[in-house]
Every structure is written in C-alpha cells, then in structure tokens.
Amino acid sequence: MRILDEKNNKSVSNLTVLLEKSEAIQLIGYLEELILVRAKSEHYHLNNADYTKEITVALYSDDNVEEFSDRYKLLIATDE
C-alpha cells in the first residue's frame, strides 16, 4: 500500500477516510472494476459532492509500474 499526500508531496503512513454511504458504494464499484478489468494504467477518482476532496485509487504491480509517473514510481519503489 502506498499513500501520497499530493499537496505536500509526502508519503503518508496512516490515513483515516470517512465516507458517506453513497461514496463507499462508488468506491466499492471502482475497486471491483480495477480488479476485474485489470487495465494496466486504469485508475479512478472518487470525489465528494462539491469536488473539494478527492481519493484516487489504482492497482500497482511489477507488471504495470512503468505506466505511472516518475513521482508514483518513486513512491511505489521506496514508499517516499
């Protein structure tokens, strides 16, 4: 698992996510798509109602790490 605070460009070790039911349902759908579709560079953005908050989810593995930006490659490789 890798978590990036994009605003501060720092790896995060602990994160609490509080979702409304509709957001949780949407996140479950995105995760199911990621698992079933298995497209190498697929990712999803989960936003709150007014788009002021966002969670981006993607799957990474040795098979698709090259599809990510340099910043995410570093995060995946070093968790930094």
Image (cartoon, rainbow, N blue to C red):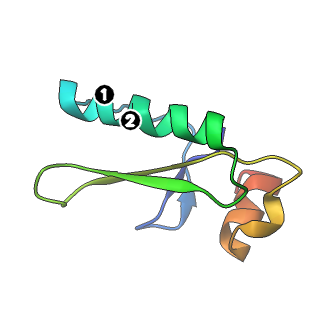
Q: Residue at x 67, y 71 (%)?
A: 71
Asked which secondary structure carries label 2, the reply is helix
Relative to residue 21, is residue 26 depicted above or below? Answer: below
Please state which of residues 74 and 10 is positioned toward the viewer in this rendering.
74
In the image: residue 26, left or right of residue 64: left
**Residue 70 in view, yes or no:** yes
Q: As shown in the figure, which amino acid type bears the numbered disc 2?
A: Leu
Q: Residue at x 64, y 43 (%)?
A: 37
Relative to residue 4, is residue 21 depicted above or below? Answer: above
> Where residue 17 appears, x then y in whole percent?
34, 33
Q: Which residue is mark 2?
A: 27
CA–CA distance between discs 1 and 2?
5 Å
> Where residue 26 appears, x then y in whole percent?
32, 36
Q: As shown in the figure, which amino acid type bears the numbered disc 1?
A: Ile
Q: Which mark is residue 25?
A: 1
Q: Which quarter of the rendered picture does the N terminus lie within?
A: top right
